[in-house]
Image: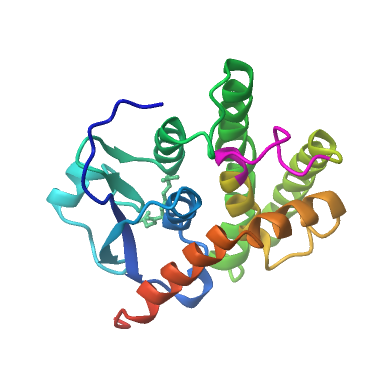
Amino acid sequence: MSDTSATTQPLVSAFRWVPDFARGLVRDLRVRWALEEIGRPYRTVLMDAAQPRDAEYRAWQPFGQVPAFDDGAIRLFESGAILLYLGEQDETLLPTDPAGRWAATAWTFAALNSIEPAVSRLVSLDLFHTNDAWSAEARVPALEFVNARLRSLADALGELDWLTGRFTVADILMVTVLRNLHHTNLVAAFPNLAAFQARGEARPAFQRAMNAQINDLSNGDTP
Ligand SMILES: N[C@@H](CCC(=O)N[C@@H](CS)C(=O)NCC(=O)O)C(=O)O
């Protein structure tokens, strides 16, 4: 358990507007989901994705991205770091035994470092470069790479419900990474991965987090 002296409701940065394709996929969803799992209320600091972030925000999140997190005790950026920090405070999100904790930490890095970059590359080609002459050729190896990664992930998951056998922050991260492939049938080709993603999305905490993100986005003005 953490000895944080946080007493205030955490602040989570998020967007008040994003293009349609990004609704339900913005990474503040991960933090909202973790907070919902542990029943911790939070407040959002909303920004417009189409507008540059100011120096004050960059002092909080150096790349001007969302999410960033501040609970009065700790200010953080990077969704993985935020989730590990929250996990440290509640066993629901991260086991306290060393073997369980480190297995979840390894899968946290796997989601963010071994799977997300491959997924992001393909998504970027499909969303932003379909009209570029070079993109069809570039998509072939990008697609192969995602498939190889998904196959390894499916093999590792096997018949387990969750990556380490029990629900942890690593599952929040992996499910939210896989969701970015919704415009393809790549995950569906691996029934255990599709079931894993569906299991995560069926959790009441996920649904509350998703509704909260969509609600913040729906209240925002279109630029
Ligand atoms: N590695 C960062 C990535 C954060 C990220 O890419 N956030 C996106 C939204 S999902 C963003 O803020 N994009 C706007 C930008 O990069 O300016 C994390 O996991 O927190």
Q: Where is residue 137 drawn, in percent x and y?
A: 71, 56
Q: Where is residue 18 drawn, in percent x and y?
A: 40, 71
Residue numbers of the magenta segment: 160-171
Residue lying furthest top? 98
Residue drawn at x 36%, y 73% as measured from the top left? 216
Q: Where is residue 128 drawn, in percent x and y?
A: 53, 65
Question: Can you tell which quarter of the image residue 161 is in?
Answer: top right
* Side of 13 relative to 79 (left or right): left
On screen, 100 above or below 164? above
Q: Can residue 134 be seen in the rendering of this structure?
A: no
Residue drawn at x 58%, y 53% as measured from the top left? 176
* Side of 109 relative to 209 (left or right): right
Residue drawn at x 63%, y 17% as measured from the top left? 99
Magenta stretch: includes residue 123: no
Q: Nearer the viewer, residue 7 or 197?
A: 7
Q: Nearer the viewer, residue 137 or 169?
A: 169
User: What is the tally of numbered marks visible in this picture?
Assistant: 0
Q: Where is residue 2 drawn, in percent x and y?
A: 36, 27
Magenta stretch: includes residue 167: yes
Q: Can residue 171 be seen in the rendering of this structure?
A: yes
